[in-house]
Image (spheres, helix red, strand yellow):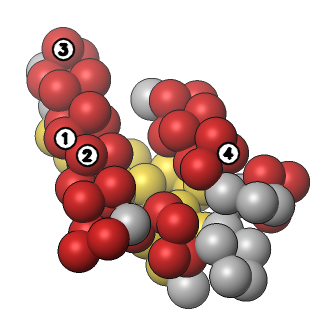
Amino acid sequence: MKELIEYMAKALVDQPDKVVIKEIAGEKTLIYELRVGEGDLGKIIGKEGRTAKAMRAILSASAMKLGKRAQLEILE
């Protein structure tokens, strides 16, 4: 799932080499922290948060197949 987030994020930003994803695994929950280069944060969040919401929906659907919960945190 980390690769899925990385693929989506790199397709959206101007500086794909600065995309960093950290995975924190819990018992039933996976937390992914996404960091992007300066100036690319708005592209990841999107207008009114629509892009971020769509990424989270795809991630949740993917996690459900594994029987887990996934959470995406977008950090500055």
The residue under label 4 is: 10
Amino acid marked by disc 1 = Ala
User: Spatial distance from mark 4 to mark 3, Cα to Cα?
Assistant: 24 Å
Sequence-first disc among 3 and 2: 2
Callout 2, which amino acid?
Answer: Ala
User: Left or right: 9 with respect to 57?
Assistant: right
- Which residue ends up furthest to the right in the rendered image? 17
Residue ID at (18%, 14%): 65
Give the residue displayed 33% in from the left and 45% down from the top: 55
Q: Is residue 26 placed above or below 40 in the rendered structure?
A: above
Q: Is residue 71 visible?
A: no
Q: Nearer the viewer, mark 4 or mark 3?
A: 4
Query: Which of these two is toward me, 56 or 26?
Result: 56
Q: Is residue 23 left or right of residue 64?
A: right
Q: Is there a contact, CB below 8 Å, between mark 2 and mark 1?
A: yes
Check disc 1 and report the residue beneath it. 57
Numbered circle sitting on residue 54: 2
Q: Label 3 belongs to which residue?
A: 65
Circle 2 SS class:
helix
Tell me the quarter of the picture where residue 11 sits: top right
